[in-house]
Image (spheres, helix red, strand yellow):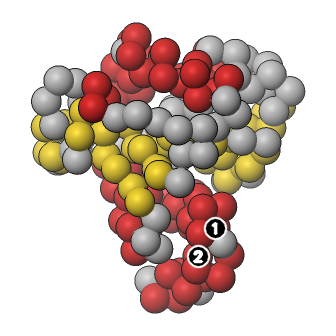
Amino acid sequence: MKVYVMLADGFEEIEAITVVDVLRRGEAETTMVSIKSDKFVLGAHNILIVADTTIEEIEIMPEDMIVIPGGGKGVQKLSESKTLQSLLRKHQEQKGMLAAICAGPTIPGKMGFYNGVKATCYPGCEEELEGAIISNNDVVVDKNFITSKGPANSLGFAYTLLSLIKGEEISEEIQKGMLFI
């Protein structure tokens, strides 16, 4: 299983980089993907990130996970990407794992993926999770979807992803090493 973290200019840095950091500590193969033609992506707080690759260069398998971080402008740009929309539809048809945090869940929400699925998001974005059963929990796992509220929940979100990918024991080991527990 590989993990692909989708990045567009305006992404929320703490949500994307925390996930990448925790998953790589747990030795989950994690790739930062720019949806642009180049690898340079500017975060919401003017932190420049060099992605590992671009969206045109990846091939996602059904067993892989896609992660969508938040950040208002970043989510807007991600939602406008026809390439990402196509990739998400194919991944959903194959029941691939899809994780999203903050405003990120609005992308699969607007695409109708959450019909009857429990999900959470940044407060005020709930109406865009079409068909979802809205949860007030910080992190929600239902079927092949993992959603989380926002920046303050980034570590919990990342540890949940690591648990799903590598198992609870590895996740707890990383949490202890990072002084989380």
Q: Disc number at residue 171?
A: 2
Residue at the image position 58 percent from the left and 21 percent from the top: 90
Give percent across and percent down for residue 104.
51, 33
Give percent across and percent down for residue 124.
61, 28
Q: Nearer the viewer, residue 161 or 89?
A: 89
Residue at the image position 60 percent from the left and 62 percent from the top: 165
Q: Amino acid at mark 1?
A: Ser
Give percent across and percent down for residue 75.
41, 26
State the quadrant of the C terminus: bottom right
Residue denoted by label 1: 163
Q: Are marks 1 and 2 in contact (CB under 8 Å)?
A: yes
Residue at the image position 46 percent from the left and 50 percent from the top: 3
Q: Is residue 66 above or below residue 162?
A: above
CA distance separating discs 1 and 2: 5 Å
Q: Nearer the viewer, residue 96 or 163?
A: 96
In screen coordinates, is 91 left or right of 70? right
Q: Amino acid at mark 2?
A: Ser
Whether residue 102 can be seen here: no
Q: Nearer the viewer, residue 148 or 52?
A: 52
In screen coordinates, is 8 left or right of 70? left
